[in-house]
Amino acid sequence: MKRIGNSLLKMSLCIALSGASMVSTMAQSKFHVDLDYHYNLGLSTKKFGHTYGRSDYDMGGHSLRLGARYDVAEKWSVGGGIGLDRYTNDDYNTMPIYATLRYKPLKKLAGAYAFTDLGYAIAPSFGDFYKGFTGKLGVGYTVNLAKNFGLNFQVAYDYKDFRDIYYGYINADTQMPIFYKSNSTRHSLSFGVGVTF
């Protein structure tokens, strides 16, 4: 468990340093880099064919995301990114690669936007990561502090699909352990804060 935590810390530092180096090479204000932290407040989870709520599990999670976007029009921005997510109760690590889309509907409130992130979590050869579909749908607001720098705030619905999880139990008749693979899903309310370059 300590080795997994160290691997996640190293990956987080690599993501942060990559974001900083990308910022230094930006040539125009239509290109943006976002580095965000999200807390995922778990609302419900489904496993073993049953749905469990917050009264059953104190579900949570933390997420670090690094993304790059390009303004294709005045109101539209598209891009992609990579993340490191840790979900708790049950504990799962994921590494999502995702596409992102932002839309600014209000001209008088230029910092406000609606967004969606859709992608798939990969399972690299190191660490203990789970594969599966990932998606966010929410709203955000950017407070510009300089020409190419701002603070970013988001609230979103977060969906996560965890694939090929090993479960086990003791057979009551034979007293032998039985193991099998199954899938699980998590529905969360996500609160994000970060920086935009």
Image (tube, helix red, strand yellow):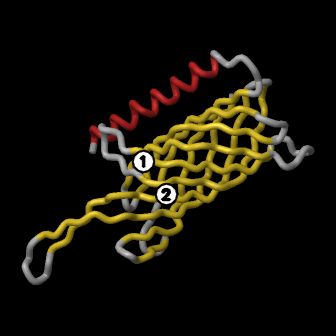
Residue 148 against residue 63 in the figure, above or below: above
Q: What kind of residue is marked 2? A: Lys
Q: Residue at x 41, y 56 (%)?
A: 88
The x and y percentages for residue 119 are 53, 48
Apparent side of residue 171 relative to residue 63 in the rendered image (left or right): left
The residue most toward the front is 72
Q: Residue at x 68, y 19 (%)?
A: 26
The residue most toward the right is 108
Q: Nearer the viewer, residue 17 or 76?
A: 76
Give the crowd class for mark 1: few <14, some 14-19, many >=20 residues within 10 Å.
many
Which image quarter holds the C terminus? top right
Quadrant of residue 123 within the rendered picture: top left
Disc ID at residue 54: none
**What residue is disc 1 on?**
94
- As helix, strand or loop, the secondary structure at mark 2 comes to strand
Q: CA distance from mark 2 to mark 1?
A: 9 Å
Give the crowd class for mark 2: few <14, some 14-19, many >=20 residues within 10 Å.
many
**What residue is disc 2 on?**
160
Q: Nearer the viewer, residue 161 or 156?
A: 161
* Sequence-first disc among 2 and 1: 1
Q: What kind of residue is marked 1? A: Thr
Which image quarter holds the N terminus? top left
Q: Residue at x 64, y 16 (%)?
A: 25
**Pointer 2 with pointer 1, Cβ within 8 A:** yes
The x and y percentages for residue 30 are 76, 27
Total marks drawn? 2
Apparent side of residue 117 relative to residue 178 in the rendered image (left or right): right
Residue 74 against residue 14 in the figure, above or below: below
The x and y percentages for residue 155 are 66, 53
- As helix, strand or loop, the secondary structure at mark 1 comes to strand
The residue most toward the bottom is 173
The x and y percentages for residue 110 are 85, 41
